[in-house]
Amino acid sequence: MSGPDVRSDASRGWLLAAALMVAGFTAMGLAIPAFGTANLALLFLLPVVAAASGVGRRAGIAFALVAGTAFNFVALEPRLTFQINHASDLVTLAVYALVALLTASVAVRLAEAGEAARAEARTSAALSGLAQRLLTQGSRAAVLAVAGKAMGEAINTPCTLAERVEDLQIANTADDAAARWALAHRDSAGKGSPTLTTASAFYAASRAGHRSLLVKVSGDAPDDKALALLRTMMDDTADTLDRLDLTHREAEDRQRAAANAMRDALFASIGHDLRTPLASLRAGIETLDVADLSKLEHVRGDALRLEQTLVNLLELARLQLATEPPAVEAIDLTDTIAAAVDAMPAPVRSRIQIDIAPGTPLVASNAVMLHHITMNLIDNAAKYSPQDSAIGVCVADNGLGGAILSVVDSGPGIGDDAQDLFGLFRRGKNADSAPGSGVGLAVVDAFARALGHGVTVSNRADGRGSVFAVTIPGVPRA
Amino acid sequence: MITAQILIVDDEPQIRRLLEAAVTRGGYRTLAAACAREAIHLAETHSPDGALVDLGLPDRDGIELVARFARRAMAVIVVSARDATAEKIAALDLGAADYVVKPFDTDELLARLRAALRMKSADTEQSGEIAFGDVVMDFKARLIHRQGQEVRLAPKEYALLELLARNAGRVVTHAQLLKSVWGPAHENDVEYLRVAVRAIRRKLEVDPTKPLLIRNEPGVGYRLMVT
């Protein structure tokens, strides 16, 4: 509750009490003949209660005295004088005054109890509201900012909360000393405290918890109750910070573990994919017979494979370093497939059968990334299926304005490790003897993810190979 | 006829030797430079017909040579280890006839070089007709015949094909095609281009789903193939 409100409440109390008093006078003056003094005497208790509960104990007493005097003036014979004729009237007046005083004090106590209950409710509301709000903050700075603001609202004076003195941005040495003293002693210091009183603000540190927080109160020093509230709020905030730390550490641990697993898998793939053709190259060169150049074709194939792995690695690195999402444009999958097929070595090219359904819509994708996806899927199909077996590259409408690009092979099909095939860049269980393509599928997976295209792998319906399918959305209608 | 002379610019001696051997095998005379300064000097003193330019030169970026040589009406082919799409587009827009990424296939490189030189000579004689596949395009009469039958193209389709045909064998970037056929405001409306290319293919390709005449280089542009 703020200062102006308190004042206006008190003046309302005074006003109400005075109005009731005047009303009492009037009623008594008019109505005595009809109702008699005893009943009307009670009327004068109303302003007393109003003053006592609305303003305070002293006002209550003052009104009790005024009411007594007024009762004498209006109701006791001789009326409209302050004289008292009968001894019994003196007793009446004395009893009346006593009743008025007691009423005032009861009213005051009731009002105080009510105020205490309201203050209690405000405090617990402030605390529970704070706990709720702190839970939703993602960073330490946000937690401190929100808690500081809540503390300021709770004690009605601007507060700043920090973990270190440096974060409070203190300009003068007196305040700096007070802040440091408060934090070091886990106590309060500065303006309005017993220590270092020349500071311009009040500083208090939290006492509980292994992390001490420091609050700067810019304004009047808080009273004991407010200080206790601030400390409770600081403790709650410290708890939240601890929890936040733990959550972050857990998330980091999880991320690190996932990154480690990914890196290990990638290195294993790269090692395999680079070493195999290199070993083959060396063997080929060492046994090269100038008279028999047929081996040269193998050497060339190995060099090409090395190159493809290198390109894939570079593309992966490029994607990882990219700061912007890939640019998307309208693409005719006819172009994508023709370019990918063109990039294949002649023996693979001759195995490809293209089947594009007529009227297939244009799709929205990134031409270069889709090119690499397609090349790697064809490359994968070529590696994991018998030499000279057909590789189907098909495009069909997906029924949603987009298209499905699928690559169908006649290989052994996929085992039950279909998910791993992409996720961990591993070569499938059925692929032990084939030249590696772990990195190739990693590129397919990473690029499809970056573009938001779905990739699925399944066995052919006739069980004679596998199908890798990429679902690509259509071009948005203008 | 005097054989064409090709300037080879690459700072790697091994690559330079490989290129020299390949170009000589293709029947051309060669000049070789290891840096931009030397290349500029040779271009000015010998006026070669074409150049194979590496972008990563020790003294300055090869892309500067591309613009300079293109202004001299040389057929410039970039031979670079840089494979970023943006770099390809920049080189093509500056007037390079083609862009070949290292490591390259020497036969492929020679084919590109032949196409670039032919385009250059076609430029100079202002040829009025071009044949590709079973198609003959007559620029003056604005007529296209396929296997002797006239083929009708929509005006935009014709303009697009004419631009590709005048640059036959070389990649014309998407932006260049869109700008000159649809206007500068439509430089990014790739969808127009895709739809028009589809329509042309339906009328001219043997199998529109396996295009042999109009080929796309992903993210870069279209090329009309001439044999």
Image (tube, coloured by chain):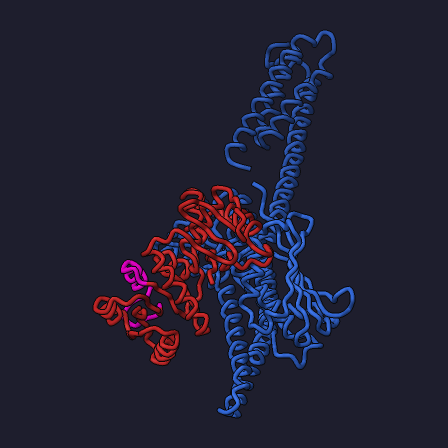
User: Residue lying farthest front?
Assistant: B148
Count numbered badges in the picture: 0
Residue at the spot 41% in from the left edge and 48% down from the top edge? B139
Residue nearest the viewer, comparing A307 with B195: B195
| Left or right of A464 on screen, residue A73 | left
Q: Is residue A271 magenta?
A: no
State the hue of chain A: blue
Find residue B48 and report its image quarter.
Answer: bottom left
Find residue A27 and report its image quarter.
Answer: top right
Q: Is residue B68 magenta?
A: yes
Residue at the spot 70% in from the left edge and 65% down from the top edge? A467
Residue B119: give x, y in percent of width and height: 38, 59
Q: Quadrant of the N terminus of chain A?
A: top right
Residue A346: give x, y in percent of width and height: 56, 72
Q: Is residue B103 above or below residue A292?
A: above
User: Residue lying farthest right?
Assistant: A462
Q: Write down which chain is painted red.
A: B
Identify the magenta region: B55-74
Residue nearest the viewer, comparing A138 with A406: A406
Q: Is residue A417 above or below residue B89?
A: below
| Left or right of A90 on screen, residue A475 | left
Whether residue A192 is visible here, answered yes or no, is no
Q: Quadrant of the C terminus of chain A?
A: top right
Residue B204: give x, y in percent of width and height: 54, 52
Whether residue A457 is visible here, answered yes or no, is yes
Residue at the spot 44% in from the left edge and 53% down from the top edge? B164
Q: Is residue A161 above or below residue A55?
A: below
Residue A343: give x, y in percent of width and height: 53, 67
